[in-house]
Amino acid sequence: MTERRDRLDDVQAGDIIRGRKRSGRPLLLLVYEADDAVIRTRRVTTGETFDFDRDGQCRQHSDNERCIITSTATLPPADYQVALGLDRKMRAAKELTDLALSEAEIDLLQKVDAYFEARPLPKA
């Protein structure tokens, strides 16, 4: 088994991972469910959902744009907590003012792509 497959097999509910759309748009994803066949994720900033096969390839998505998992690196504990809080905030927001970002959330969003890009999944 390859190192890439091992890392993807280790993904479980509660993990924060990174994906990328074919267009290049990065995706900060919370894994909300995972089994032997599928990794179900929610985009932290929008709530948009993506289902991935265990090979890291996205199943058909509503906008027909394919995407892949690019990193399963573990975020530092403080950043992980901020990402979880941001996911919760985005899901619970009822008013536009509920979406105001804290300094910690802004900091996370400014650095998280570089963090994951420095820790990519190995090539297949």
Image (spheres, rainbow, N blue to C red):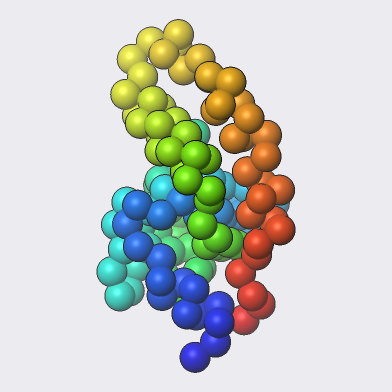
Task: Count numbered badges in the picture.
Answer: 0
Residue at 66%, 50% (x, y): give it. 115
User: Hey, which quadrant is residue 33 in on the image?
Assistant: bottom left
Q: Nearer the viewer, residue 4 or 76?
A: 76
Residue at 52%, 62% (x, y): give it. 72
**In screen coordinates, is 86 left or right of 91?**
right
Task: Give the answer, above or below, for where 83 lies relative to 97.
Answer: below
Q: Position of residue 90 (x, y in %)?
A: 41, 27
Does the rendering let one see residue 29?
no
Q: Nearer the viewer, residue 66 or 49?
A: 49
Q: Nearer the viewer, residue 50 or 101?
A: 101
Q: Position of residue 111 (x, y in %)?
A: 67, 39
Q: Position of residue 82 (x, y in %)?
A: 47, 34
Does the rendering let one see residue 24?
yes
Residue at 41%, 13% (x, y): give it. 98
Q: Position of residue 45 (x, y in %)?
A: 49, 34
Q: Quadrant of the C terminus?
A: bottom right
